Image (tube, rainbow, N blue to C red):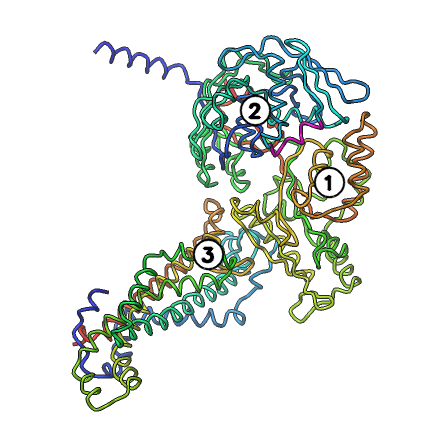
Amino acid sequence: MKILLATGAMLLGAGLAQAQEITIVREVDSNNYDPHKTTSRAASEVLFMIGDTLVSLAPDMLTVEPGLAESWEVSEDGTLYTFKLREDVQFCDGKPMTAEDVVYSVERWIDPDTSSPVAWRAGDVESVTATDDYTVEYKLSAPFSELLYQLTQSFGTIVDQANVEALGDDFGVTGFNGTGPFCWVEWTPRDKMIIERHDAYTWGAPFHDNQGPASMERITWQIVPEENTRTVAVLTGQSEISQYVPYIALEQLKGAPNVEVVQSDLAFWTYFMGFKIDKETVSDPAVRRAINLAVNQEAMAEDLFFGVVQPAYSYVSQEALDWDASLDDTLLKFDPEEANRILDEAGWARGDDGVRAKDGVRLAPTAYVFAGSGWAKLSEAVQAYLREIGVDMQIQAFDATVAWGKLATQEFDMFGMSYPYVSSGDALNLYFRSENMPTPNRMNWNDARTDELLLAGATAITDETRADSYAQVLKIVHDAALWLPLYHEPMVIAQSTELETVTPHNIYGAGLYKGLDLKFAE
Amino acid sequence: MSAAADAPPADGPAPGRAWWRRLLSDPLALTSAVFLALVVLSAVAAPLIAPHDPFASSRSVMQPPVWTDTGSWAHPLGTDGQGRDMLSRSLYGTRLTLLIGVLSVGLGGVLGSILGLMAAFKSAIDPYVMRVVDVMLSFPAILLGLALVAVMGPGAWPVIVALAIATVPDCARIARSIAVSVMKQEYIEAGRAVGLSDAALFTRYLLRNAISSIMIFISLRFGQVILIGAALSYLGLGARPPVAELGMMAAQGRDFLLFAPHIAVIPSVLIFLIVLTANVLGDALRDVLDPRLRG
């Protein structure tokens, strides 16, 4: 009886003081939460919260600010980075974080045995050494102008050697000992991930209003695959916040008194369709230019995405670091007449069925896209535009489980893809380097000049050289019309008005970043 | 199915006269027949009567149907998420849905009936045929469709083939059970006695007496096949865009369910009505043709 009363009193107490707990609904889960072994956005979202990186990226996507490193120096030749670490950082299990942990994390990241798909993001590492307990020397064989930006990504999360070794293959599956504002509690794959406040946390980046500890005691990341269900969850308060609400629901959510919709001005997640340039039809630059001119991105952004997204004519956001503004006027925009003229001139004549052909080859490129409502809508809209200029695009949609494999083949002429990036260089190095064929350079763009300039940009020591090299690459690839850019997606977050307004972040599409802003309104 | 197995033998080669007249005297059957005839006619004539190009998208997306406050006669059933005319797409979608249903039931029905009749006619091959049929029966149609699409790639044909294959075993069993009872009849014995060839015995005596019961089964099966076909398309395995198919249209409308429900509801209601009327008609057909139920 006593116990019963005590429990009752406790429950009453808990009811009076609002529990600092929220549920975040999202669409998909990750295959694991090992920072070196997954590239999924779902993993980054959680890893940013349960782990920390050496340096942090401000919401402007340009400024690198302190993280676990309170300061850093770069040598003149751009090959030696010396990080001075904070001395007050500890892991969730209470162990202090030292330079040895940083050394271990980077070495595991680039170790061929780890076979990390993101090892290249660490740069061409020669050695990483701890000169004392709180100083790390990060030595590169060649300068890597992207390094600091790459180190802000979740792939650069500092891990705990003892934890990694104890868990083995289960690291990031059954547990994770990090230094982030939250700590791992429990993961049920494809259902939910529960994390709890890290009470000792005080080392948040300067741009956060709250440097720690976090205000939320417990966060549940709940998987809800169906988009209407997520909308309803946010409307009814089952979930306090989500960036995975469909655009069609935004008007209704904005109208709801208990929901606030916040949107970032920046949009660093770009959707595009690429051309495999050694295929019979799309090998003709005239065809690629015409396709670029045939699609009305502005109408698509308004009709399919309700004006939330930015129509894209460039391959990276025009706000991204090192975007060359002089290209702004040369971008290919909607002009179907010009598209028809180019195709006529290039000898693609319309047949009886309205589809163009040349030398017996029908202009009917096959496009591989991901199955699901997003790409279905996009590719069908593109298909309808292309019909107008006599291009009969064939759509083949594949479930995500097989799509990645299919997209690594040489079977298709066009492909649909979207990707996050921190800067122009990040994007260009990923997609246009010849050594990245057949994937992610699915275009088979094999150009010595591009490779040379990309290397020059990556190893540039000054901002000017870097910007200049990347500007030239941007011009080359846009002139060749290797992609059909579709739209840049901003970060849109629907949140309960019970929470203070969050600042949406664009880093790798993880809109809540560290989760330090999450706080119930007073 | 088991009911058909112990059905008393039909006593004459031809079923009753003017069966269709008796069929249409049932008001429910008449309504269904008229509705189905209309659907089939408009589907066949889709290219002539569709007011818009079913593939042409426009800037007026998610227009509501004409009976709502903001609807207009320009798009009587509204437009979908890509601004395509729902009426035109429904007409073309029905066309493909019916085509898938008719072709797969036809193919599977013919193949299954032949297998079942042969098994009953030649008892030597009976165990082999029926074991193969048992194996086929243990394979769900949806799974078969998934496997075929994985091999052949998405499109209407793999769906037709999958549904046809799924129809074969059921149909073979029904045909066999009917044929077995027919084979026991005295007129078969008599035919044998007067020295009729196997071929003549098969077509003139067995087939004629079994066909009406098989037709009933096939007509009942039609509704089922349309449903499975729509389900496969709903899963993105059937028709490839921009082609319209009712199941696929329902799937595309799912995203708009909260805001523009007509995009999902119209094709779903069409599927519902087609399947319902096909089943009602099939039932009525059985009442008229089934010898046991004949008054």
**Which secondary structure, mark 1?**
loop
Q: Which residues are magenta?
A: A116-124
Q: Which residue is mark 3?
A: B233
Same-subunit check for callouts 2 and 1: yes
Q: Amino acid at mark 2?
A: Phe
Q: Quadrant of residue A385?
A: bottom right
Position above or below: B192 against B29: below
The alpha-carbon separation of the residues under discs 2 and 1 comes to 29 Å
User: Residue A48 got which mark?
Assistant: 2
Percent x, y for residue A414? 65, 52
Q: Which residue is mark 1?
A: A433
The alpha-carbon separation of the residues under discs 3 and 1 comes to 39 Å
Q: Nearer the viewer, residue A144 or A332?
A: A144
The alpha-carbon separation of the residues under discs 2 and 3 comes to 39 Å
Same-subunit check for callouts 2 and 3: no
Label 2 neighbour load within 10 Å: few <14, some 14-19, many 20+: many
Question: Label 2 lies in what chain?
Answer: A
Q: Is residue B71 magenta?
A: no
Q: Quadrant of residue B109?
A: bottom left
Badge count: 3
